């Protein structure tokens, strides 16, 4: 079939296709990734007033793309051990599910929020002035701490000005009233009449310069 050209051709150019990019050798987390013989990890102790014996939580990490600019450390498995057999069934189930989520890859930080939202019908407890709604939420604290340690969760801190202001106020309160015993035998620097902070769940909110301010995370109603 003939094609009629309406306009005069005055020039032309050759368009070269971009060379295909070489396949990336970067390894990402996925469920088919084989477990190495040796993993690096950390063990955390959870002691609560709800259980007679402490729980020991071990989180092992896999190092992806070692000795390269793409090197990353990601959680691979979790184990929970205790002398108490009271919670054996759900502990085993939880470790298997969490480990499976770790190996799946992607964004696994959502686990922290999900575990924090579990409330014990018998009520929670305070640790170092921080309210913990359940033993499962305490496990969420451990996982969050570990993810911050390996850089998977970025730590949010007050700006330099607010941190200095809070430090000065805490020093002033400590000098005036001394350290306040709280949460059993543990000692914290927050007044005994401090209120619970809705942001960090710590009893550290006091009226400071006419504004309710948290001495732990710096959250303030006045911005």
Image (cartoon, rainbow, N blue to C red):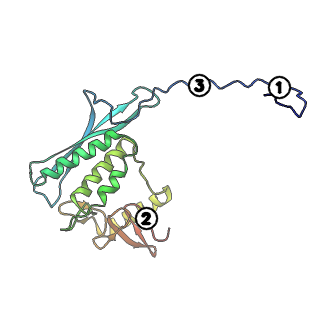
Q: Residue at x 32, y 42 (%)?
A: 102
Give coordinates of residue 110: x percent, y percent.
Answer: 37, 51
Q: Earlier in the sequence, mark 1 or mark 2?
A: 1
Toward the viewer: 181 or 35? 35
Q: Which of marks 2 and 3 is nearer the N terminus?
A: 3
Q: Is label 2 or label 3 in front?
A: 3
| SS type, badge 2 | loop
Mark 1–mark 2 Cα distance, whole angstroms, equals: 65 Å
Q: Which residue is drawn at 44% across and 54% down?
A: 157
Q: Which of marks 1 and 3 is nearer the N terminus?
A: 1
The residue singled out by tag 3 in the image is 20
- Classify residue 111 as left or right of residue 27: left
Task: Bin the neighbour count of mark 1 within 10 Å (Cα to Cα): few under 14, some 14-19, many 20 and up.
Answer: few
The residue singled out by tag 1 in the image is 12
Mark 2–mark 3 Cα distance, whole angstroms, equals: 50 Å
Mark 1–mark 3 Cα distance, whole angstroms, equals: 25 Å
Q: Any mark on residue 128, and which?
A: none
Give coordinates of residue 214: x percent, y percent.
Answer: 39, 66
Query: In the displayed structure, would residue 179 be above or below residue 58?
Result: below
Q: Any mark on residue 219, and which?
A: 2
Task: Bin the neighbour count of mark 3 within 10 Å (Cα to Cα): few under 14, some 14-19, many 20 and up.
Answer: few
- Classify residue 145 as left or right of residue 222: left
Give coordinates of residue 67: x percent, y percent.
Answer: 41, 25
């Amino acid at each position: 079939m003939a094609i009629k050209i309406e306009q005069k051709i005055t020039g032309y150019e050759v368009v070269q296709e971009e060379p295909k990019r070489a396949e990336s050798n970067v390894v990402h987390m996925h469920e088919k990734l084989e477990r190495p013989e040796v993993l690096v990890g950390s063990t955390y102790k959870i002691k609560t007033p709800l259980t007679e014996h402490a729980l020991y939580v071990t989180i092992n990490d896999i190092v992806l793309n070692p000795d390269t600019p793409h090197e990353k450390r990601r959680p691979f498995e979790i184990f929970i051990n205790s002398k108490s057999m009271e919670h054996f069934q759900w502990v085993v189930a939880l470790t298997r599910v969490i480990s499976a989520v770790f190996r799946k890859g992607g964004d696994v930080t959502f686990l922290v929020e999900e575990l924090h939202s579990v409330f014990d019908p018998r009520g929670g407890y305070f640790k170092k002035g921080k309210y913990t709604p359940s033993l499962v939420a305490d496990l969420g604290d451990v996982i969050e701490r570990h993810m911050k340690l390996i850089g998977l969760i970025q730590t949010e801190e007050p700006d330099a000005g607010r941190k200095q202001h809070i430090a000065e106020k805490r020093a002033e309160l400590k000098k005036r009233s001394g350290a306040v015993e709280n949460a059993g035998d543990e000692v914290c620097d927050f007044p005994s009449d401090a209120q619970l902070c809705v942001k960090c769940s710590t009893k550290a909110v006091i009226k400071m310069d006419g504004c309710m301010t948290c001495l732990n995370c710096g959250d303030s109603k006045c911005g």
